[in-house]
Amino acid sequence: MNSDRLLDRDLALAMSKQARDVGGPVLREVIDYGLQVFQRCSSVAEGHDTPIGVLFPFLHTLEMLDGAEILLDSCAAAPASVTLRSAFEALLSLLWTAAEDSERRGAAYVVTEIHRRITHINRYDPSTDAGRRFQEALREREDVGVPLPPLQLPDPEKERAELRAVLGQEHLAAAAAEYERVKAKAGRVRYFFALWDGPTSWELLAKRVGMSSFYEILYRHWSATAHAEDLRRQLTHVGQEPAVRRLRAGEDLIQAYAFGINIGLDAIQALLRRYRPEEMSGPYWAWYRERVSGPYTRLASAGVLRERT
C-alpha cells in the first residue's frame, strides 16, 4: 500500500487556494456578523432562563464555526467536520429552545447543565463513589508509565453546594422536578430537550425542528469521522494499487465551507426572530445580499456537484 508523502502542507494550501479564497472570507463574515447579532440580542433578552437556553447555544455555534474556519483555512476539511458537527448540535438546541415554550425549555437547559457540572465535580472528588472509580482508573494509567496530570478541584463540597443552591431557585423548580422524574424513569438524562416528553436523541430533535434532511445528509457522515468509522475516506487508489489518501487532500473543503455558512445563517435567523424580528425584514437581508449571497451560492452549488462526482 503506497503511503508516500502523506502530508504536504504547502501542496495542500496551493491546491485549495481558490476554494479558501472564496469560502474563508464569507464564513468569517458570517461569524463576525453573528457576534454583532449576539450583542444586540443580549441587550434586549428577557426572562430568567430563556436567554441562557437561546443565547449560549448560539454563541457555541459561532465558536465552533470559528474553529472550523481555522481548520478549513489550513485545508483540514476532515477535522473541521467534527467541529461543524458540534456547531450543528448547538444549532439544534437553539432552534428547540427559541421555537416555543422558551422559558421552560431554557430552564431545562440550565438544570441539565447544573447536573452535568455536579457529575463532573463528583468524578474528581475522591470522597465520592465516582471519584474513587476515577482514581482507580488513574492508577491503572500510571501502571503503564504514562501518568495523567493531577486533576483535582480546590473545594468540591463548596462547589456542589453552590450548584445545588441554584437548583433550589423558584424559577427552576419545575425543571428540576422534571429532571428527577425523567432520571428515575430512564436511569439518566442525556439531553435537556428530552424533558417534558421531548425528543430523546439528536436525530429526533432534528426531525422536530425541521432539520431532518441536514441530519441525514451530513450529520451521520460527520459522526462517522468523529468516531473514527470512515475508513472509506482514508483509502484511495493510484492506478490499480490501493493507497492511503493524503491528509489535507481537499475533498469536501468546498462543501464544508458551504455548510458552515449555512449553519451560521440558520443560527442568526433564529436568534433575530426570537429577539429582534424587525431586523429580519431590512438589515439582515440587505447584509446577506451584499456580503454573502453571491459567493455562498457558488460554494453551495459547487459543494453539491463535488459530493456527487
Image (cartoon, grey):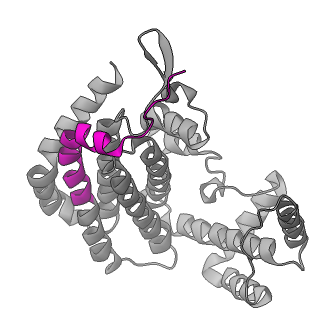
Q: Give the percent coordinates (x, y) of residue 56.
A: 46, 69
Query: In this image, 250 relative to 135: left or right?
Result: left
Front residue of this view, candidates 215 and 8: 8
The tally of labels here is 0
Q: Which quarter of the rendering shows the C terminus?
A: top left
Asked whether 203 falls inside the magenta stretch, the response is no
Q: Is residue 15 above or below residue 101?
A: above
Query: In this image, 213 relative to 153: left or right?
Result: left
Front residue of this view, candidates 195 and 264: 264
- Taking the spot 57% from the left edge, 36% from the top edge, the residue there is 224
- Taking the spot 32% from the left edge, 79% from the top edge, the residue there is 44
Q: Is residue 169 above or below residue 111?
A: below
Res. 272 in view: yes
Q: Which quarter of the rendering shows the N terminus?
A: top right
Q: Is residue 302 above or below residue 290?
A: above
Query: In this image, 189 relative to 47: left or right?
Result: right
- Taking the spot 41% from the left edge, 11% from the top edge, the residue there is 239
Judged by its main secondary structure, the magenta piece is helix
Magenta stretch in the rendered image: 1-30
Asked whether 28 falls inside the magenta stretch, the response is yes
Front residue of this view, candidates 201 and 35: 35
Q: Quadrant of residue 29?
A: bottom left
Q: Give the percent coordinates (x, y) of residue 43.
A: 31, 81
Q: Quadrant of residue 51?
A: bottom left
- Taking the spot 40% from the left edge, 58% from the top edge, the residue there is 67
Q: Give the percent coordinates (x, y) of residue 152.
A: 75, 80
Which residue extends farthest top? 240
Res. 258 in view: no
Q: Give the percent coordinates (x, y) of residue 137.
A: 85, 62
